[in-house]
Amino acid sequence: MSSTQPLGRTAARPLRVRDQAREAAALIAFSAATASCLAVALLLLTHLGSQG
């Protein structure tokens, strides 16, 4: 049994490995930026809280 599909029946092309790697790198960068911004915001809040 073949795993290939006829040309007319494919809904979308599967992503290439480099496209998947690019998406993974973008997700990692977004996650790192979000975590960094949250950490800086929490540090700023704790610093301002200890001032008053």
Image (spheres, helix red, strand yellow):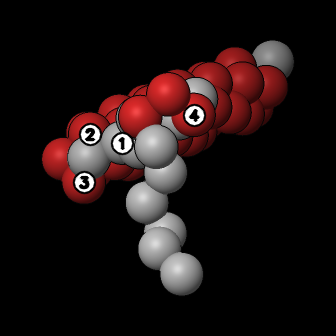
Type of the residue with mark 3: Val
Residue at left 26%, top 46%? 16
Give the labeled residue for mark 2. 19
Q: Is mark 2 on a helix, strand or loop?
A: helix
Label 3 crowd bin: few (<14), some (14–19), many (20+), radius 10 Å: few
How far apart in space, not on screen, are marks 3 and 1 (Cα)? 6 Å
Q: Are marks 3 and 2 in contact (CB under 8 Å)?
A: yes
Q: Position of residue 41 (x, y in %)?
A: 62, 24
Q: Does residue 36 appear in the picture of this structure?
A: no
Type of the residue with mark 4: Arg
From this view, report whether residue 38 is shown above or below residue 20.
Answer: above
Q: Are marks 3 and 1 in contact (CB under 8 Å)?
A: yes
Viewport quadrant of the C terminus: top right
Residue at left 24%, top 54%? 17
Q: Position of residue 24 (x, y in %)?
A: 38, 47
Q: Do the residues labelled 2 and 1 touch (CB within 8 Å)?
A: yes
From this view, report whether residue 43 is shown above or below residue 1.
Answer: above
Q: For marks 4 and 3, give the one nearer the viewer.
A: 4
Give the labeled residue for mark 4. 9
Type of the residue with mark 1: Leu
How far apart in space, not on screen, are marks 1 and 4 (Cα)? 17 Å
How far apart in space, not on screen, are marks 2 and 1 (Cα)? 6 Å
Q: State which tag comes first along the sequence, 1 or 4.
A: 4
Among the 4 quarters of the image, the one containing residue 48: top right
Among the 4 quarters of the image, the one containing residue 25: top left
Q: For marks 4 and 2, give the one nearer the viewer.
A: 4
Residue at left 49%, top 51%? 5
Viewport quadrant of the N terminus: bottom right
How far apart in space, not on screen, are marks 3 and 2 (Cα)? 5 Å
